[in-house]
Image: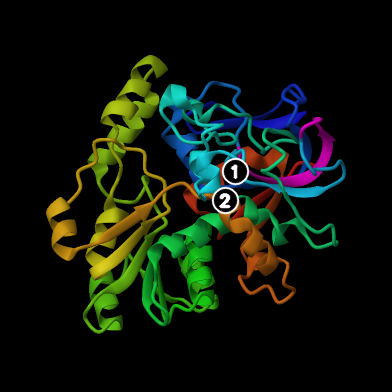
Amino acid sequence: MRALTWQGREHVSVETVPDPRIVEPNDAIVRVTSTAICGSDLHLYSVLGAFLDSGDVLGHEAMGVVEEVGPEAGDLRVGDRVVVPFGIACGHCWMCRHGLQSQCETTQVTAEDSGAALFGYTKLYGQVPGGQAEYLRVPQAQYGPVVVPDDGEPDERYLYLSDVLPTAWQAVEYAQVPDGGSVVVLGLGPIGQMAARVAAHRGAGLVIGVDLVPTRLAMAAKHGATVLNSQREDILGAVRDLTGGRGADAVIDAVGMEAHGSPLAEAMQKAAGLLPDAVGRPLMKKAGTDRLAALYSAIELVRRGGVISLSGVYGGVRDPLPMLRLFDKQVTIRQGQANVRRWTDDLLRLVADPADPLGVLDLETHRWPLERAPEAYAMFQRKEDGCVKVVLDPAA
């Protein structure tokens, strides 16, 4: 089959690789009909190469049609149209039963002291081949895949159940925005766009979106957010003006480790990514640092007693945090990998609604053949051509 493979820092290519096959009795094989590029994929593209091997298949947002099932794949049937959550969870362990599927005890990567295995996401998370491919082997198929209607609707109506929507929903849930309250969303990539829409849908009175890319700001404004350009405006002053001088009830950081700012941290990230794996891996795991501009902004923008919700990925272990400021402001921080299957049942009803209350059909800006994936990665990283969300079509 054809699949997108990692070959080196900022070097990916579509190659012919072996077809996946049933390995465990609860596996399934899915023929991928749509697969998307996530902002987290750009971390692999640029920063986390020390934890990848040449030829690793990337991608963790995929959907398609079930082609084969193992004997213990539960109620899943050949021909089912499914979305595949990016986290691999069993559904029956203590963590899964308590809504913490991202910490699944069955698939935890204990050798790396990491949480549940993820599709297409480095040795740290199991080195499971990803979904930017023609076919995908799905472990724990008795629980993971979400069967969606085979109703003639485009894949984009359901595809974002794999990651974007559950991540955005959890970000808003964790933000605890009071009814009619205010929330700032930092970063208006796919997660930030959906977090802003979800917050408004769930009753926020004021949703403020912050970014520096005009097309992203325009998309968020179209869906009702008050937008601020971080390159042109005094964001702290503007947010305080909009919130009676108090600051926002909640701030969602949808940016994460690769925020603009901190040239030193940026240089350290890039240097670690260029080192040989034997040196780069320990450095990232024991001394890694992030660019924390977005997190520092969140700490200033949130009101005293407010909540910061982190959905942007951070990977550093030696990040300096302003603990005095956090303590003085009595700020609550909630964070973590999305517990996808905790939210998908509720979200499926929303995305299947013909009224499209979350605007899922208005997120994709580019749908390209899988063969153009390397070009798409470069475009997405550089934020060119109005790119917000790229969906790849393996059959095109």
> Marks 2 and 1: in contact by CB < 8 Å?
yes
Report the amino acid beneath label 1: Phe
Q: Is residue 120 magenta?
A: no
Outermost residue to the top: 278
**In the image, residue 266 lies at what x, y percent?**
30, 40
**In the image, residue 7 lies at what x, y percent?**
56, 25
Q: Nearer the viewer, residue 89 or 37?
A: 89
Q: Over which residues does the magenta segment extend? A: 59-72
In the image, residue 363 above or below residue 223: above
Report the amino acid beneath label 2: Val
Q: Quadrant of residue 246?
A: bottom left
User: Which residue is disc 1 drawn over?
Assistant: 86
**In the image, residue 242 lies at what x, y percent?**
30, 82
Q: Does residue 206 appear left or right of residue 34 in this picture?
A: left
Q: Pick the quarter of the image with the N terminus.
A: top right
Which numbered disc flags the more N-terminal residue, 1 or 2?
Answer: 1
Q: CA distance from mark 1 to mark 2?
A: 8 Å
Q: Is residue 65 magenta?
A: yes
The reply to whether residue 34 is in sight is no
User: Which residue is disc 2 drawn over?
Assistant: 340
